[in-house]
Image (cartoon, helix red, strand yellow):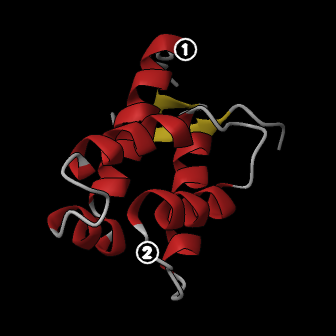
């Protein structure tokens, strides 16, 4: 089985940061808050800051709790649906995916092999 080289830690971190930013941009509650300037005239900048703040949490904080708190503190939005949980779950999953190594099988298809013990 041929193996491609694993991405560097810096590449993994950059990919994770971009993935978190995209995830937050796609969150309807945050998108609505930014579009309506509920965080003030710099709502878009706050969203970008928010993505960086979420990235900096790992591995110490409860992502969902921080999402909910920032939405309330910075955008005056009380998210009472399950969307914050879904976004948090996505972010945690993305973090885990960034720690996996791609491999190419005998047919030339890329597969993902976890670094965790199986």
55 w.r.t. 82: above or below? above
Depth check, front residue: 42 or 109: 42
Residue 58 appears in which quarter of the rendering? top right
**Mark 1 Cα shell of 10 Å, populated few (<14), some (14-19), many (≥20):** few
Screen quadrant of the C terminus: top right
x and y percentages locating residue 70 in the rendered image: 53, 57
Residue 40 appears in which quarter of the rendering? bottom left
Determine whether, in the image, residue 103 is placed left or right of residue 45: right
Q: Which residue is mark 2?
A: 77
x and y percentages locating residue 72 in the rendered image: 51, 67
Depth check, front residue: 49 or 94: 49
x and y percentages locating residue 6 in the rendered image: 51, 16
Q: Which residue is mark 1?
A: 9
Instruction: Identify the secondary structure beneath mark 1.
Output: helix
Determine whether, in the image, residue 12 is placed left or right of residue 75: right
**Mark 2 Cα shell of 10 Å, populated few (<14), some (14-19), many (≥20):** some
Q: Which residue is rendered at x = 24% and y = 73% of the image?
A: 32
Does label 2 or label 1 sit earlier along the sequence?
1
State how far apart marks 2 and 1 are (Cα).
35 Å
Q: Which residue is rendered at x = 51% and y = 47% of the image?
A: 94
């Amino acid at each position: 089985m041929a193996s491609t080289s694993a991405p560097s830690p810096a590449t993994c971190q950059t990919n994770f940061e971009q993935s978190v930013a995209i995830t937050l941009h796609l969150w309807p509650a945050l998108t609505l808050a930014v579009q309506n300037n509920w965080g003030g005239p710099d709502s878009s900048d706050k969203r970008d800051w928010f993505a960086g703040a979420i990235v900096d949490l790992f591995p110490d904080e409860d992502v969902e709790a921080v999402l909910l708190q920032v939405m309330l503190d910075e955008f005056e939005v009380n998210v009472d649906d399950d969307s914050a949980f879904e976004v948090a779950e996505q972010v945690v999953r993305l973090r885990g995916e960034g720690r996996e190594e791609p491999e190419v099988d005998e047919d030339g298809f890329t597969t993902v092999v976890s670094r965790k013990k199986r």
